[in-house]
Image (cartoon, coloured by chain):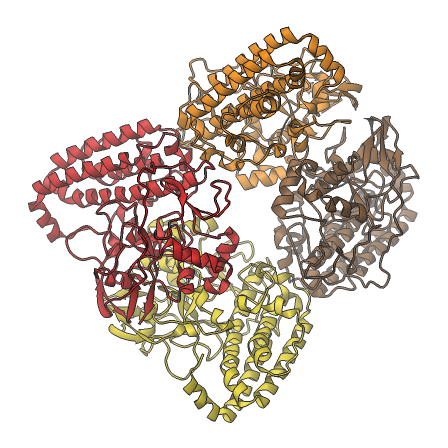
Chain colours: A brown, B yellow, C red, D orange
Amino acid sequence: MTDHSEAARLADAVPAQRDALAQRFRQVRARSAELTTSLSAEDQGVQSMPDASPTKWHLAHTAWFFEAVVLVPHATGYRPFDARFFHLFNSYYDALGSRHPRPQRGLLTRPSLEEVHAFRRHVDAAVARFIEDASASAWTAAEPLLTLSLHHEQQHQELMLTDLLHAFSCNPLLPAYASASAPERHRAAEPLAWVPGPAGAVAIGHAGDGFAFDNEGPRHTVWLAPYELGHRLVTCGEYADFIADGGYRTPSLWLSEGWATVQAQGWQAPLYWLAPGDPRAPADHWQVFGLQGVGPLDPSAPVRHLSFYEAAAYAEWAGARLPTEAEWEAASSDARLTQLTGHAWQWTRSAYDPYPGYRPWSGAVGEYNGKFMVGQIVLRGGSLATPEGHTRPTYRNFFPPAARWQFTGVRLARDL
Amino acid sequence: MTDHSEAARLADAVPAQRDALAQRFRQVRARSAELTTSLSAEDQGVQSMPDASPTKWHLAHTAWFFEAVVLVPHATGYRPFDARFFHLFNSYYDALGSRHPRPQRGLLTRPSLEEVHAFRRHVDAAVARFIEDASASAWTAAEPLLTLSLHHEQQHQELMLTDLLHAFSCNPLLPAYASASAPERHRAAEPLAWVPGPAGAVAIGHAGDGFAFDNEGPRHTVWLAPYELGHRLVTCGEYADFIADGGYRTPSLWLSEGWATVQAQGWQAPLYWLAPGDPRAPADHWQVFGLQGVGPLDPSAPVRHLSFYEAAAYAEWAGARLPTEAEWEAASSDARLTQLTGHAWQWTRSAYDPYPGYRPWSGAVGEYNGKFMVGQIVLRGGSLATPEGHTRPTYRNFFPPAARWQFTGVRLARDL
Amino acid sequence: MTDHSEAARLADAVPAQRDALAQRFRQVRARSAELTTSLSAEDQGVQSMPDASPTKWHLAHTAWFFEAVVLVPHATGYRPFDARFFHLFNSYYDALGSRHPRPQRGLLTRPSLEEVHAFRRHVDAAVARFIEDASASAWTAAEPLLTLSLHHEQQHQELMLTDLLHAFSCNPLLPAYASASAPERHRAAEPLAWVPGPAGAVAIGHAGDGFAFDNEGPRHTVWLAPYELGHRLVTCGEYADFIADGGYRTPSLWLSEGWATVQAQGWQAPLYWLAPGDPRAPADHWQVFGLQGVGPLDPSAPVRHLSFYEAAAYAEWAGARLPTEAEWEAASSDARLTQLTGHAWQWTRSAYDPYPGYRPWSGAVGEYNGKFMVGQIVLRGGSLATPEGHTRPTYRNFFPPAARWQFTGVRLARDL
Amino acid sequence: MTDHSEAARLADAVPAQRDALAQRFRQVRARSAELTTSLSAEDQGVQSMPDASPTKWHLAHTAWFFEAVVLVPHATGYRPFDARFFHLFNSYYDALGSRHPRPQRGLLTRPSLEEVHAFRRHVDAAVARFIEDASASAWTAAEPLLTLSLHHEQQHQELMLTDLLHAFSCNPLLPAYASASAPERHRAAEPLAWVPGPAGAVAIGHAGDGFAFDNEGPRHTVWLAPYELGHRLVTCGEYADFIADGGYRTPSLWLSEGWATVQAQGWQAPLYWLAPGDPRAPADHWQVFGLQGVGPLDPSAPVRHLSFYEAAAYAEWAGARLPTEAEWEAASSDARLTQLTGHAWQWTRSAYDPYPGYRPWSGAVGEYNGKFMVGQIVLRGGSLATPEGHTRPTYRNFFPPAARWQFTGVRLARDL
């Protein structure tokens, strides 16, 4: 992950760096637990579809990641909490041995939630010890992996919420994850303004000292034709107009695969929108299910829980298009742009291909990103569920084009 | 369910009958809860396949049955615990409204297990009151349904165990439901003896005062050609010989659908048998998973967790056949026959067709049995999981021919 | 198939028997070819679903059957037409080697139809020679198999028509198999009369000299409670009343599996009924597709192309039930009953279980019937497509309960 | 498709242009028929998978395209051959009405092959008349569509071969499409040389007068980092080394989706490679099935019938990567590169995304390319089955990453 000169530089900075990392470790780990306080053990065990995982599994898998990537290879004398957990909580790392089938994660009533928390405490203690005691060489080797493991846990914090929300949406009682004491209400959205971005030869991708995933680099030049981006995200009110105008019944607006999906799945609105009269929440207007339960559609809020297909069809209907990921990144430093993060991941018109010169990290963590570079679409930005400080302008999130259970939204673009 | 003269007779017997039923009600209901004491709330929420249900769902559904069949129609002024539970816990009664999709019962983390127990207590109290206070006419109408509801709950007590065992079998940790303090060990099985049964015109089916399901009647004559039955069930040791002799690789032993299933599913042994060297319980001989966890195969124990296809193939290999349900019932009063119940339900060679003159009960409970009379095979007897006193010689259990997760076994028959 | 004394008796009768069989062989074989005269080679190659086969495949398979069952084992010096055809045209005989996957029979554009006819001529000549020249012992061994092969070919003659009709039904042009010069029109159906059948101890099943399939025996006693049968089949007009009365929208009329199938498949009428306004044959009343193309529904014609589920739901709606196969057979000698054959196979309320004492034929032909005795329903009678003289009162046809592409209909029964 | 000034220029050139187009029309149409001369009507009707179509369907669809796009909108007084063919032979144009389901194209035994040829003759005559007689304005409007229709027919000429080859591969007889009188044998392949391509700001995409599909433009600048390409395609011999080295058993070489596909499908070699000992062509070395039937693997021939997943895994194994489509196009004018076309379409590492500024053609033909721009991978070059003169360096072919039945191969690339 790092070359030798960077390693040397890191060694000098070690004491302060160790303290900082220890504190950050405690914060990130505590945050995972905090996210579950309103949930019962039953809630935390459920898996509503193969793509989603139980909360408990996320808690165990993120502990396993520290164990598999940091402690076992680098912490001398570390004793795993339970050797059988390697099989249970490996997600997709072929280099790290066998694994429990993904669609059956919800069947793991054992270990119990309590045991998983004991597992986490075991790992917490071992990592804390390692941060304090590791030899310089062990530290140099392990620190990037430790940092990666923290970013990994933050990614799962977002997934814990999206997966739980999906599970709750399958329950006719439509339970709320969080109390609606302070429901998010958006002020009337401003009229959409168009903001031109940098064109010609532009550099994108990560560079410099800070952490980034391997797929964000190397930094490289792209050539952009003139374009402009919508200054804010598309709102629920705008999207409701698309629906009212027959958007879901007009094949010419859709990519072929999107239209086939609309018909096969019977889509008529974003995921979690309840049509007027839905027996689960009868009302004479659209209702929306979310982390705070069911509430009336807020026309000013950014539309969320869209597939790429729907995002692209909406853009077509609006006489615009989706931005490429390079356009999004190049323009993202422009202060006129709002809602870059904190609301919804933004579908781009870019398939998730490797950057020129891309090489995966070496070792098992080489499977982190690179092997998914086919059949996925890049999303940029960050959502309401993205942990504070986790995302970056160079961040390349990715999901298959039909995915709707993430906090996904739309920013428009058009040629100049 | 009863004709008018029987109703009149019942009215005279009411006071003692009410007391007896109240006691029986308490016992049956308590038994359901007892069965769950070793299970966590997580364990009780899981559904491992569409055919199985979570323990919690069974607990709630059996309460719902009393509510839907007895309390709402017959107990004046009864207030349902939660109106939404009608949709959640209806199993398959079209006459009783909409229902939650069967394959998604495991997604109901709410209501919590605790709320389900509160629901059960609410129903318990209301049923107790009803037994004490019901008018004579309400009692006459409701008593048969109350009795049915108790037998219904007993059926679910067996399903709670079979479904839980299946869920645990999907967990690589292979947890034990019950401690193995007193593991069931069978004495060396006696050599198989053959016992002839009554032939010619024979009456089968339920008659008389005691409870029976509608599918057990009417009592009627059948004509049986001479036959004899094995005096005991087929053992694990005998079945292991069938496997060792290539039983699972010899198409001529199998029904066509059975052979196709063997190949499609890769069956090589009964469900829950772990082959020598299975990574979940490495050993150099067969191991068997059951309610008490994993243990070595007991050659004297009745073989269990077989499909009808396997039962029929074994019988073919053994130069015998499966008994018809009429043969089984006709011969069942012969004292030389052992293991009639208490070990395994016994596959017969009879499809689950209606008896001559069969009519389903009237009302919603008419859906209890009759509508399943196609595509199923009759099993007779009773298993280790069948509640004490629940089964009868006329009892017609039924499952599809590929089902293996029940406690199913084999008794042989042959022509004379 | 025959015991020794019968074989001896047969030997005496051989010369006349050989002549008769030679003539019958020529007739049956010629009939297969005649059935294809209105079809192009393209028509004869198509397979519209896994359960159906191309006409060409039927022509080749029936030739293969003579080759595999008669010529190769019994005709000294016989040289197969093409050794590769053994794999291509074996249907389901595990004892006779590997086979081409059933769902891919429509992909066999080679051998060509012309080559298949050459194959048939090759077999025809060899069989004719064998009939003339076989030694007495070869004849004794082979004659029953030769006779079986002819009945086998007749069964496929019916399948050629049902499979072709299904293939044509998938073509929006809805081509006619036969010209409609003399369309079948039924006189107004007589009011339904009820005819009681023999009750008590009754013998059913085949006995005597004539040919029968193994599944028709042994003859045995059954005990029948009093019953009566409808004197004729249910008509299209009567079935249209069932539809108009909401039959397909009333779950209480249906078996559970039937209702699930109705919903999953969207059934609203028998197969091949075109609803008023269907774009393939627009009209303001029901149209029916059949061998002579599309025409208006004839209310007096027997209803056809029903599943068992629909037959049973209709009977329930009509306040009746389906006959058991024993009732059907016992009553079939009563002259008051009409339409026993020549119109539609009649669904019974009997699963296809073995008769008491049933043993399959020995050798490869043992796979003919016995291995299908699970998951199927017995049909009795015969249809408009059944070859003259092929069926018998003891004949046990069978199909899965959801099958609709055969010429299947309904005769009602009720208890007395 | 063309702007107004181009239209004006075209009008001047009309007489010569009409003659040239008439001649080209005759040639292209005749070529389609020539490709079928070795095939029976049966061969031409078969569909072996949903992605492939029968030869007859290709013949009819390409005629329909002229009818739907040129004749009906532009040829005054044109009478369609059969109005029902609009439904039968529309492929995927939502703007042009309903269509027969793609997976059921093989069920259309009617119209017959003969009728389809009559349909083609009808269209041929009408197009010839139109070319001769069309008014200047009709000509200006229709000429681009006529030209498009010819290129469309050429695309289907290649598909006719790939689809037929797939159908033949499903037949255990493995018939040859073409006689092997002059089997293609490659001289020993030259050692692989690496050829650097133009880097920095490079223009790609179609520009100028000649025909191109809409997806090839607009011409635009891309920025390329330094790279080099293999001078020739990867050979069968090289690919056999990959197999022998365990390529299909090494997950680290594969994209995640690719590895899942390898396991789910049991892939062990390219499509149409027969392993040593395959019962369809027993031999002690690899055999390959192709248009000329089965023959021994030619180690010098370009490897073909690979998925994108296999191409990428091979490149990984070889220490290289696949070229991006921009690299391929930029380098393609370098004479040192061989096998650019005529052997195999070359998988690139580029998802099929729209070019900057891309707009689909207007009208129904706007559905030609644009709506497929998700989930597909770009291939460049051309194959042995690509019609002479059909392909261009800017040509963007595309297929899903798992597709193997096309003539697809591999050219390697690497960073400099």
In x, y percent, where is residue A23? 88, 54
Q: Quadrant of residue B218?
A: bottom left
Query: Quick one: which residue is furthest to the top in this view?
Result: D16
Of residues A118 and C187, the one drawn nearer to the viewer in this rendering: C187
Is C127 on the left or on the right of D144, as rendered?
A: left
Residue A133 versus residue D399 in the image, above or below: below
Query: Would residue B240 be visible to someone looking at this image?
Result: no
Q: Quadrant of the C terminus of chain C?
A: bottom left
Which residue is most to the left?
C12
Figure check: D181 above or below B269? above
Residue B215 in view? yes
Q: How many marks?
A: 0
Q: Which residue is nearer to you in this view: A122 or C39?
A: C39
On the image, the x and y values in percent for residue A240 come to 77, 48
Q: Quadrant of residue D404?
A: top right
In the rendered structure, the answer to whether residue A375 lies left or right of residue D170 reads: right
Taking the image as shown, residue C339 lies to the left or right of residue A67, namely left
Comparing C341 with D42, the one in front is: C341
**Residue C390: horizontal and vertical position, in percent?**
23, 47
Check the image and report above or below for C276 versus B26.
above
Left or right, residue C137 beside residue A260: left
Residue D171 lies, in percent from the top left, at 42, 31
> In the picture, residue C202 is in which quadrant?
bottom left
> Which residue is painted at 81% across and 64% down in the image?
A179
